[in-house]
Structures are given as C-alpha cells and as structure tokens.
Image (tube, helix red, strand yellow):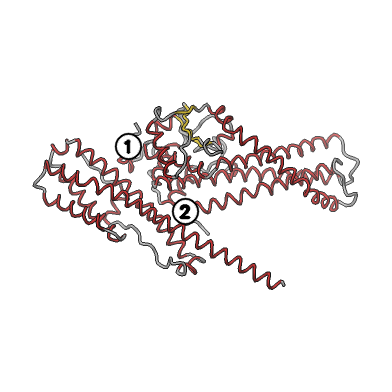
C-alpha cells in the first residue's frame, strides 16, 4: 500500500515538472515570436517611408544615381526577406545605404532645407531608434528561451516537445554593434 | 529556477509574491497563538490545570476555533476597504481627474498602452506638485486610475513618460493594489492583536491572576511569540511591496520594448520623488525614497540603484549614468510631449 502511494506521488511530481517545463517553453517561444513580429512592424514602416525619401532626394540630387539605386535595391531585398538571417542581412544593407544617402544629402543645401526631407529624416531616425530597442528586446527573449531550453531539467524534454533547436539572434555586424552601443547615428545640419 | 531574462525574472518575482502572501496567515496564526497564551496566563481563558506544557497544548487545540473567527474578521475588513478605498485615496492625495482634451499627448500614451493589452483605459489624474512621482490605484474593473505629478510631466520626455505609465499599467494588470490591500489588512489585524497582547503586559504589572499557576511564563511566552509574528508580518509586507516594484519595472519594459527609457526615467526621478501622502498611499508610489529610513528590511521600494541593476541584468538595458538631467545616448530619441 505504502509503495503504491510513493509511486503515485513520484509520478505526480514528475508530471508537474514536465508540465511546468513544457508551459515555460511555450510561453518563452511565444514571447520571442511576438518580439520578432515587433521588429517586422518597424521594418515595414521604414520600408514604406523609403520611396518618398528617394523621390524627394531625386528632385534635388538626381545624379546621385548610385546611392539612390543602392537604397532601392536594399529596400527590395528587405521586402523579400523571409528568414531571420535574410532579414538581418537586408536590414544591415538598408541601414548602411540610408546612412550613405543622408551623408550625400549634406552636399545639397536646398535638399537639407526641404521640410518634407527633414520630416522623413526625423521619422526614419525615430524608427531606427525603435528598431534598436525592439532588436534588443527580441534578442533578450531569444537568449532567455535558449537559456531555459538548455537548463536542467527542461533540457531533458525540450527535444521531445519540438523545441530541439536554439533560436537565432537578430545579429548586427561587429562594426555596427560598436556604433549601436555608443550612440544612435546623429545627423548634423 | 533562477531568472535568466525578463520573463523568468517576472516569474521568479511572482513566485516570491505568492510565498510571501502565504506568510500572512501563518503570522496571523502565530499572533493568535501568542494572544491565547497571554489570555490564558491572565485566566481569561480556561487552563488545563496541569503543567506549562499541557497549557500550551490546550492553547494549540483552541486555535481550531479562533482561526475561522480571525478569517471572518479579515473578510469584513476587506469588504470595507474594497468599497471605500478609492474615495479615501482621492481625498488624501488631492489628485484631480483630467480628460483627453486637457492632456491629449499624455492621455494618448496611456490609452495606447491600455489598448495594447486589451484593457479599459484607466482614469488619468494629475497632482499639481513639482516632485516627480506617479501611482496606480483602484481595485475593481472600470475603477482603475493612474496618477502622475505635474513635475513628472515637465521633466520626462515621451519615451520616459511612456515607461512610467507602463510601470503603473503593470500594477493595474497585476492587480497589485488589491494584493497590497490584502497585505495591509492582514498587517492591520495582526497589529491590533499585538496591541491587545502588549496592553495585557501593562495590565500584568498591576494585578497577577490567581487562576493560573503558570501565569507568568505563559504571558512571557505569548508576548515573545506575538512580537515575532508582528515583526515578521511587517517585514513580509514590505518585501511583498518591493517584489511588486521589480515586476512593474519589468512589465514596463515588456509593454514599451524599451528598457533604456525606464532606466533614464528612474534616474530622473531619483532624489526628486518626495510627495506628501499617508504611508499606505506612499507605498504605491513609483518611487518611495524615505529620508533617514535606510533600513532595507522596512522599505516599501527597492533602491533606484537596485531597480536599475535588475533592468540591466534581466532586460538588457543600458544606464545613461546619473548625471543630472543628462540622457546623452537617448537625446536623439526624445520627441517632446508637447
């Protein structure tokens, strides 16, 4: 009789541990997916602003074709990206291309005085900051998911529940990372 | 399991809150037991007529009857607080309700946060004070309220204000006001019982009971037990309050996706949060920095430094430093509220 009770108690405790581990993994997985969706929202907003920006710059600096094309191409690549890796690459390309575009704009006083251009620049830098924040939030969620997944006792059942692989981070180039940890890129007028 | 990130940090703190809440009934039982011993010592309660050990055993068996009584008292007390709470807070803080047209930017920030969690927008209130503080109140759906000071509106930029509102929204979402009312009711009942015991001690110096030969030791043991229960009840209440602040900070980051804004808001509030209000209301403030009240065990809020350290460790935040009014690294994000 006692033996049966002991066995039932052990099974019940094990059941709770497995249940708890599973629920934690599902919650953390959801959180990371949700955070990635936040990045997507910001990326989409940025993509929507770019055609307007390119048009505005064209009006004043039409012969800067190379820079303008680079932005357009990067935007197209960003729009077509599906996996995290592709998105990371496209995002970095676009950030770089936009940086060059704003640098070029420095040479055109009329463009710099255009209110439409200023408004777009302000909006883009705002999105850039929000992107930096949601990227870190996403990476935090991913790091947490990966850590809990690899911890004991969760690691014993993670594969069984379909959480066998680690989630990829939203990485930034090493050079960019140094810049991001310092201060957001400032634009002088 | 130890916290490794924002969500596990929240889970760990919530587990701690639950354990702390369980502590209150335990302490109440302890104090009731102490009270019984004291009453028995005076002869108000019947004694076993035997040894000290038998008297203590009898007191233990009487707990079965006294605990349900204490629970009923607690429930009645809770019902009174439930209905009278908001009116009392409104009267004590001098906060004034504002509409969307009075503070459109602020109202929109709060409304967006509420919408993002599918909640009814809390009432927005403002206190005309230069100090930097905010608090959430209300215990019933549809009666929640978020109050900020005029000084806070002036000092914080848009992102920081959003973080503070999100901190208060998290208190609303987690029903922390309710938790703290339960805590203060338990602490209140325990302190009333302890006063009975302490008054009994005074009374003891006047006339010793002749009904119980174990009177002296029983009174002393009862007093000691009640004193321990009383101190622990207060410590538990303060620990519970501090735990809820960590959760609210983490919740603010979860809502705004921006740990830096919460950190720089705390930096700005630090040292400038003093606001006149009764103790129970001060416990609900964004920051409750008590001068000369350094004992960490009895503080309602963790220090700003500890809160920032938790945000850096668990939410990946960056500290702009404590220089007055300087938020160099986020200056370009600052979109003025007006």
How far across and how far down the image is residue B232, in percent? 66, 46
Could you give the CA–CA distance between mark 1 and mark 2, rounded to whole angstroms?
29 Å
Residue B88 falls in which quadrant of the image?
top right
| Label 2 secondary element | helix
Q: Which mark is residue A141?
A: none
Residue underneath mark 1: B335
Q: Quadrant of the C terminus of chain B?
A: top left
How far across and how far down the image is residue A7, in percent? 65, 71
From the viewer's side, name the closer residue of A22 and A117.
Answer: A22
| Residue drawn at 56 percent across, 36 percent down | B292
Determine crowd level at label 2: few under 14, some 14-19, many 20+ residues with C-alpha closer than 10 A: many
Residue A20 to residue B232: above or below:
below
* Apparent side of residue B242 relative to residue A43 in the rendered image (left or right): right
From the viewer's side, name the closer residue of B249 and B326.
Answer: B249
Determine crowd level at label 1: few under 14, some 14-19, many 20+ residues with C-alpha closer than 10 A: few
* Apparent side of residue B18 relative to residue B154 in the rendered image (left or right): right
Residue A162 falls in which quadrant of the image?
bottom left
From the viewer's side, name the closer residue of B151 and A2.
Answer: A2
How far across and how far down the image is residue A34, in percent? 39, 53
Q: Earlier in the sequence, mark 1 or mark 2?
A: 2
Q: Chain of mark 2?
A: B
| Label 1 secondary element | loop
Q: Which mark is residue B7?
A: 2
């Amino acid at each position: 009789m006692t033996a049966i009770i002991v066995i039932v108690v052990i099974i019940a405790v094990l059941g709770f541990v497995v249940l708890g581990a599973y629920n934690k993994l599902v919650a953390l997985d959801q959180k990371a997916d949700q955070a990635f969706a936040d990045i997507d929202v910001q990326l989409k907003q940025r993509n929507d602003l770019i055609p307007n920006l390119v048009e505005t710059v064209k009006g004043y600096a039409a012969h800067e074709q190379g820079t303008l094309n680079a932005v357009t191409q990067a935007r197209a690549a960003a729009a077509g990206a599906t996996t995290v890796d592709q998105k990371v690459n496209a995002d970095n390309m676009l950030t770089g291309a936009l940086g060059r575009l704003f640098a070029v704009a420095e040479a055109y006083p009329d463009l710099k005085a255009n209110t439409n251009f200023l408004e777009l620049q302000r909006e883009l830098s705002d999105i850039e900051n929000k992107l930096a924040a949601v990227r870190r939030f996403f990476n935090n969620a991913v790091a947490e998911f990966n850590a809990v997944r690899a911890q004991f006792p969760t690691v014993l059942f993670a594969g069984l529940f379909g959480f066998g692989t680690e989630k990829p981070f939203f990485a930034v180039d090493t050079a960019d990372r140094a810049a991001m940890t310092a201060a957001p890129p400032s634009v002088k007028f | 399991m130890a916290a490794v990130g924002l969500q596990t940090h929240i889970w760990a703190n919530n587990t701690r809150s639950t354990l702390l809440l369980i502590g209150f009934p335990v302490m109440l039982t302890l104090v009731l037991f102490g009270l019984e011993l004291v009453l028995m010592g005076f002869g108000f309660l019947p004694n076993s007529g035997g040894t000290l050990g038998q008297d203590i055993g009898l007191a233990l068996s009487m707990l079965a009857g006294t605990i349900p009584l204490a629970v009923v008292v607690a429930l009645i007390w809770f019902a009174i607080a439930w209905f009278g709470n908001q009116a009392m807070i409104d009267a004590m803080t001098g906060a004034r309700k504002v509409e969307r047209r009075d503070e459109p930017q602020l109202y929109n920030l709060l409304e967006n946060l509420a919408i993002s969690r599918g909640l009814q927008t809390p009432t927005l209130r403002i206190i005309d004070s230069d100090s930097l503080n905010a608090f959430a109140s209300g215990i019933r759906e549809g009666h929640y309220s978020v109050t900020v000071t005029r000084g806070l509106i002036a000092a914080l930029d848009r992102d920081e204000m959003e973080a503070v509102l999100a901190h208060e929204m998290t208190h609303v979402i987690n029903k922390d006001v309710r938790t703290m009312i339960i805590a203060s009711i338990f602490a209140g009942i325990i302190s009333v019982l302890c006063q009975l015991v302490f008054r009994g001690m005074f009374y003891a110096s006047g006339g010793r009971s002749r009904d119980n030969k174990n009177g002296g030791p029983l009174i002393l043991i009862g007093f000691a037990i009640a004193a321990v229960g009383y101190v622990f009840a207060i410590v538990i209440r303060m620990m519970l309050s501090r735990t809820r602040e960590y959760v609210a900070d983490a919740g603010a980051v979860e809502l705004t996706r921006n740990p830096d804004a919460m950190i720089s808001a705390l930096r700005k509030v630090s040292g400038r949060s003093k606001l006149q209000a009764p103790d129970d209301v001060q416990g609900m403030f964004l920051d409750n920095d008590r001068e000369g009240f350094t004992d960490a065990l009895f503080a309602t809020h963790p220090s700003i430094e500890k809160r920032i350290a938790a945000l850096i460790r668990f939410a990946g935040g960056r500290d702009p430093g404590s220089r007055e009014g300087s938020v160099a690294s986020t200056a370009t994000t600052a979109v003025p509220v007006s």
